[in-house]
Image (tube, rainbow, N blue to C red):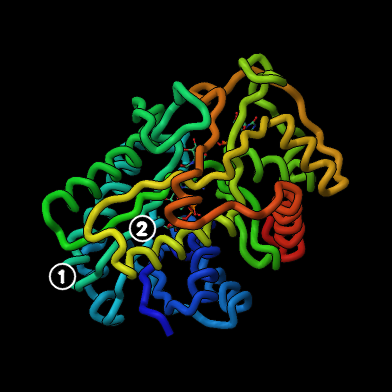
Amino acid sequence: MKPKILVTGGTGYIGSHTVVELQNSGYEVVIVDNLSNSSADVVDNIEKVSGIRPAFEMVDCLDFNGMNVVFDKHPGIKAIIHFAASKAVGESVEKPLLYYRNNLVSLINVLELMPIHKVEGIVFSSSCTVYGQPDELPVTENAPIKKAESPYGNTKQINEEIVRDTVASGAPISAILLRYFNPIGAHPTALLGELPNGVPQNLIPYLTQTAIGIREQLSVFGDDYDTPDGSCIRDFINVVDLAKAHVIAIDRILENKQNETVEVFNIGTGTGLSVLELIKGFEEATGVKLNYKIVGRRAGDIEKVWANPDLANNVLGWKAVETIEDTLRSAWNWQLKLRERGIQ
Ligand code: NAD
Ligand code: WQD
């Protein structure tokens, strides 16, 4: 058995897939989650997929003492993957303080506790949102950080700075910031996936909910952008591919390849796909016809962004391998499974 890894937000969408991949690689996992955006039965489903039940602590990362107890109860945690955060862009505009408190204080607590418990490194969930609309595409890690479009986006920028300043201060910590592009899809077993809270704001959950009849029609926000078909372009990254990037990042931290520095990696496919191409891809991959219409632009949307993933490919040795067809089919199978389970 490899070392013990703490995964905050481990019952969430990306966290649950990552826990399975860590377990598949031989790591022992402790999950901390306050279940604010996930449910406890995810732990059962992780066990069904990997055959191993992870330790689960229902603790809020805002609770410093509660987190301290987790480290005492599970001695020997060597590294942390910090997923726990609030992530709804629209909600962050309405409730900025909730977002600043949750996303900043949670990280600060974790960083303060790391040296106390001799935790060597942290992998942090950042986002391509830090680039805003990049001046050059595909975007590299050296592209300038643009003013955030939302309090949520701002928390990711500040989080990155908090990590950098902490490591620069001499804290005995290595850090890897992974900037995810647009994670989509679900586990091929359809036992893990994204559980949107209320009306989905993101494209894929809205799309699959429309395809299954929960929503009447998908609105495509704009067809007058400066792109070949006029709709926005994104880099859609399969969630299992994304999860595997975390395992490699943890391997790297524990192999001491970084020596208490901060590294940043884009985690994307390197290919941009438009919203209309994605819809067509979904229809072809699943055979399901989608009811959609073009409407006006959504405020704050980035016109086009996709990753240059060379650094992750070459330095981490990570590469996205899943096809978009399989990824879209996995999202659909997850939606079908949710109906079977009577959830949505
Ligand atoms: P998610 O909401 O499914 O998972 C986050 C988990 O953290 C949830 O289970 C939630 O209950 C938990 N959580 C939130 N606040 C907590 C707290 N204070 N204490 C303990 N647990 C807490 O979201 P996700 O899509 O899996 O995202 C994971 C991370 O990746 C987040 O940091 C998010 O900002 C980041 N990210 C997500 C995307 C995306 O499109 N999904 C893109 C870029 C970055
Ligand atoms: C994708 C495209 C929409 C819904 C957001 C966050 C970002 C990151 C990922 C965490 C856009 C279009 C969407 C719909 C549509 N999260 N769309 N109809 O905006 O790229 O990024 O999630 O860090 O920070 O901002 O993702 O899935 O919302 O939208 O036409 O009903 O789909 O306009 O072009 P986005 P998304």
Query: In the rendered image, which quarter contains the C terminus?
Result: bottom right
Q: Amino acid at mark 2?
A: Val
Q: Residue drawn at (50%, 50%), measured in percent from left and top?
A: 313
Residue 99 in sight: yes
Figure check: 72 above or below 34? below
Which x, y percent locates residue 185? Answer: 65, 52
Above/below status of 204 relative to 248 = above
The amino acid on which the numbered mark 1 sits, given as a three-letter code, is Ile
Return the disc, 2 or 1, that comes first in the chain's sequence. Answer: 1
Q: Nearer the viewer, residue 165 or 210?
A: 165
- Residue 102 marker: none
Q: Which residue is mark 2?
A: 123
Q: Is residue 232 left or right of residue 214?
A: left
Q: Nearer the viewer, residue 99 or 18?
A: 18
Question: How far is disc 2 from disc 1 in space, using C-alphas?
Answer: 18 Å
Q: Quadrant of residue 236?
A: top right
- From the viewer's perspective, is residue 122 above or below residue 314? below
Give the quadrant of the N terminus. bottom left
- Per the image, the residue denoted by label 1 is 116
